[in-house]
Amino acid sequence: MIQTCDHVLPHGITLRCRAAGTPGRPVLMFLHGFPEGAFIWDELLTHFAAPENGGFRCVAPNLRGYGGSSSPAEVTAYHARHLVEDIRALIEAESPQAPLACLVAHDWGGAVAWSVASQHPEGMQRLMILNAPHAGAFLRELREHAEQRQASDYMRFLRRADAPVLLAEHGWRRALGFFAQADGQLPAWLTPALQQRYREHWALGMQGPCHYYGASPLFPPAPGAPDHLATLQLPASALRVEVPTLMLWGMNDPALRPGLLEGLEEWVPRLQIQHLRNTSHWVVHERPARVIDELEHFVQQQFSSEDLTA
C-alpha cells in the first residue's frame, strides 16, 4: 500500500513523499522531473515493496516546489546546492544506517541525482538515470551543437516570469503539450484520468517547477543575446560520478538529443547505457515494465567494495 508522508528536513524544507514498504528495509528512492510528480513512480513503488520483489522500502518525494512540498518563492532557493541538500537530508532520514540500494531519477530529478551522486557517493550503492543529461555533456552539446540548442529552446519560455500563468491557461493546454507526440497529439498513455491528475497536481503550484529553469545557467542563449555558455565553467570535481550507474535512454526524446550520451566515461567510469528504441522522453509512462526489469537486474548486480564506496 502506498502512503503519503511529510518529511520535515533539518534545514527547514518539507518534502511530501509517496512511500511503500517497511521502514528499515533497504531503500530505493525515486526522483521525478518536470512537469511531473511523485505519483509517476506508483507502479514501481508497489512492485519493489512486495516481498517477492525484494521487499524494499520505496520512497518518492515531490521535489522542492512541487505537489505539497515546500515551495520557496525566490528563484535563488532552487540553485543546485539547495536541491542536493534536500535529497541528501531525505536519504539520511529514510536510510540512516546504510546507503540507498539505488537512487532512481528522471529529467530534473536526474539532474539533481547526478549532483547528489557526485557530492555524496556514500549515500547510495547505485544510480539509475532515465533521460536526464549529465551536466558536462549538456554544457558541451549546448555550446557545440545547434541541434541541442534548438531542442532546448523551450527552456527560455519556462524562465519567463509569466510562464506559470501561461501554462495554466485553457485547462493547462501548454503544460499538457509537453507530453505531445511528434504529430501534436497526446499519447494514448495520457488518459483523461491521468490528465486530470496532472491538472490537480499543477494547480498546487507551478512557480516552483519553473524556478528550476530560472535558477540554472544551462540554457541556450536567445538569438542575438550574449553567449553566457562560452565562459561558463563547471568544476571538474562536481562532474565526476564514481557510483555504479545505469542509464536508460529513450532515443526518440525530442528535447535531449543522442549526442548527450557521447563521452560520458570521462566523468562516469562505471557506466552502463541501455538505448530504448521507439521511446521518447517519458520513459516511466511509456515503458514501465522495461524500467522495472532493468532496475531489478541492476539491484541484483554485485560490485566490488571500491565500486560501492568510491
Image (cartoon, grey):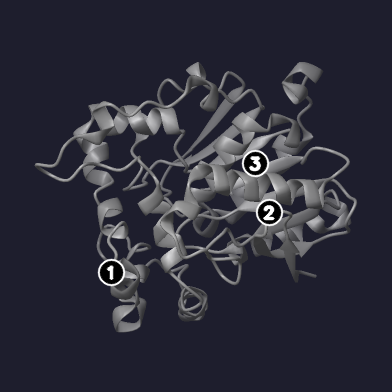
Label 1 CA crowd tier, 10 Å (few <14, some 14–19, many 20+): few
Marks 3, 2: nearer the viewer: 2
SS at badge 2: loop
Q: Residue at 56% of width from left, 36% of height from top? A: 115
SS at badge 3: helix
Q: Which residue is mark 2?
A: 11
Quarter of the image holding residue 261? top left
- Asked whether disc 1 touches disc 3, contact meaning CB atoms under 8 Å apart, the reply is no
Quarter of the image holding residue 12? bottom right
Q: Identify the amino acid type marked 3.
A: Glu
Estimate the x, y position of residue 178 in percent, counting from the top left. 35, 62
Marks 1, 2: nearer the viewer: 2
Estimate the x, y position of residue 139 in percent, counting from the top left. 35, 31
Of callouts 3 and 2, which one flags the residue occurring earlier in the amino acid sequence? Answer: 2
SS at badge 1: loop
Q: Residue at 47% of width from left, 43% of height from top? A: 131
Above or below 227: residue 112: below
Of callouts 1 and 3, which one flags the residue occurring earlier in the amino acid sequence? Answer: 1
Q: Identify the amino acid type marked 2.
A: His
- Asked whether disc 3 touches disc 2, contact meaning CB atoms under 8 Å apart, the reply is no
Q: Please count the marks in the image.
A: 3
Quarter of the figure that contains the N terminus: bottom right
Q: Which residue is mark 3?
A: 294
Q: Give residue 66's mark.
A: none
Mark 3–mark 2 Cα distance, whole angstroms, equals 34 Å
Q: Which residue is mark 1?
A: 162
